[in-house]
Amino acid sequence: MRRDILIIGAGASGLMCALTAGRRGRSVLVLDHGERAGRKIHVSGGGRCNFTNLSVGPEHYLSLNPRFCMSALARFTPRDIIGMLEEHGIGYYEKEKGQLFCRRSSAEVVRMLREECRRSGAEILLGCRIGEVRKGAFFSVETSSGTMEAESLVLATGGLSHPELGASDWGFRIARQFGLGVVPPRPALVPFLFAPEDRDLFGELSGISLDAEVRCGGKSFRGPVLFTHRGVSGPAILQASSYWSDGEILEIDLLPGRDASGILIENRQSKRELRSLLGDYLPKRFAQRWAAAYRITKPVCRCSEKELREIARLLHHWEIRPKGTEGFSSAEVTLGGIDTEELSSKTMEAKKVPGLYCIGEVVDVTGQLGGYNLHWAWASGHAAGLYA
Ligand SMILES: Cc1cc2nc3c(=O)[nH]c(=O)nc-3n(C[C@H](O)[C@H](O)[C@H](O)COP(=O)(O)OP(=O)(O)OC[C@H]3O[C@@H](n4cnc5c(N)ncnc54)[C@H](O)[C@@H]3O)c2cc1C
């Protein structure tokens, strides 16, 4: 079977590439080993997919070359994906800070992409196992449905997170086979695991959440921090995880935007135990555990001003050194991937392998939390679809 373009991966980037190339009159076949297209779109944003962010821009992406994403993002903007949803009558709303979510269900976005593929003539073959790839005059791909040939081959197999949703390292292996460098992949937007001593202290707080500012790798993120029985999660923690390296400390400001010193000094005549006073500002069970961690057992009135100032400092700079992260099974995305040095930022084509394109999460471009990852999938898929 021969087509102009073979796309491996019927996820967000692969489907966008397919419908864009199909509209140009190219014959396109999308192959996926899963039984459903767009499985990550289905589960994303808790089933309502945060499909873009109104403030999309390179500053929201991590990559060895943070400028690589600029060209594709400039040619496919939030307005473009919003326009597609509107044409299909899909309702959406702004949840917070520019994050756009579907009003009803992510399934509507998958349906829209499939419908646009159908209209453009792009075909999708699911449940198809993919094997070896060779390149002669054409790319030739061994599959469980026979050998497929094409002028252009698009790697759209995504990252390594959530293997149960179809993730595999196939894209990275094929990239390496063709001599492309791959920045070592690691989990990102992922919860942390407590070190044993912190797990003993805070493990029972599972379900408690507080508003904090989390600092790591020179970045800081304000938002909810959620305790799990194994560690910490929640938006601010997930964001920080993308900037964390093994062994590093996470610094958490437990009273962001407040003057802890002022609060404690104001109350310095109080006979209440400090953990009880802190319970007015933090979840009570957390305040107790936190005070126990620092062996603070006295009433406030028995603390010296110096002690109170030190406690205030600790409240703004609570440090934890996680044992690690929950790994790819829980990560939302993969950091690293096919080195952008190898690709044209305009077309996503490999500079040294004409006809080979790489798009979406398989490439070393990773967005922050908030719709940036799906937007990169749309934008890079669109860029390749214009040239493949
Ligand atoms: C739980 C969760 C929630 C998320 N929520 C959001 C969100 O709200 N907003 C946001 O912007 N991002 C979100 N993301 C991230 C976003 O879903 C991904 O970044 C995006 O889907 C990547 O698109 P992609 O096309 O590169 O890869 P994918 O969408 O992962 O598609 C890759 C496809 O390739 C197929 N494939 C892989 N290996 C093979 C193989 N060997 N043979 C054949 N087929 C193969 C897979 O089956 C899959 O269909 C979330 C991710 C997760 C896991």
Image (cartoon, helix red, strand yellow):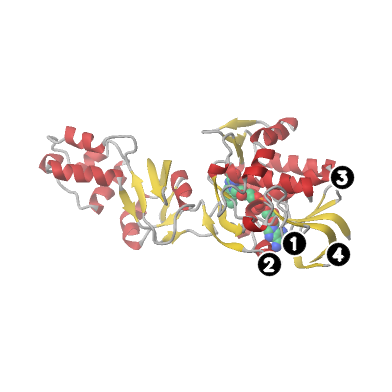
Up/down of 230 relative to 282, above or below: below
Residue 137: numbered disc = 4
Q: Nearer the viewer, residue 95 or 248?
A: 248
Give whichever of discs 3 and 4 has the lower sequence position. Answer: 3
Residue 353: numbered disc = 1
Left or right: 14, with 60 as reference point: right
> What's the CA distance linking mark 3 and mark 4?
21 Å
Label 1 crowd (10 A; few <14 / some 14-19 / many >=20): some
Label 4: which secondary element:
loop
Check if mark 2's residue and mark 4's residue have beta carbons within 8 Å: no
Look at 33% across and 42% down and name the residue there.
Answer: 254
Q: Nearer the viewer, residue 334 or 301?
A: 334
Label 2 crowd (10 A; few <14 / some 14-19 / many >=20): few
Q: Amino acid at mark 1?
A: Val
Up/down of 239 relative to 92, above or below: below
Look at 29% across and 36% down and name the residue there.
Answer: 281
Q: Mark 3 — residue?
A: 25
Q: Amino acid at mark 4?
A: Ala
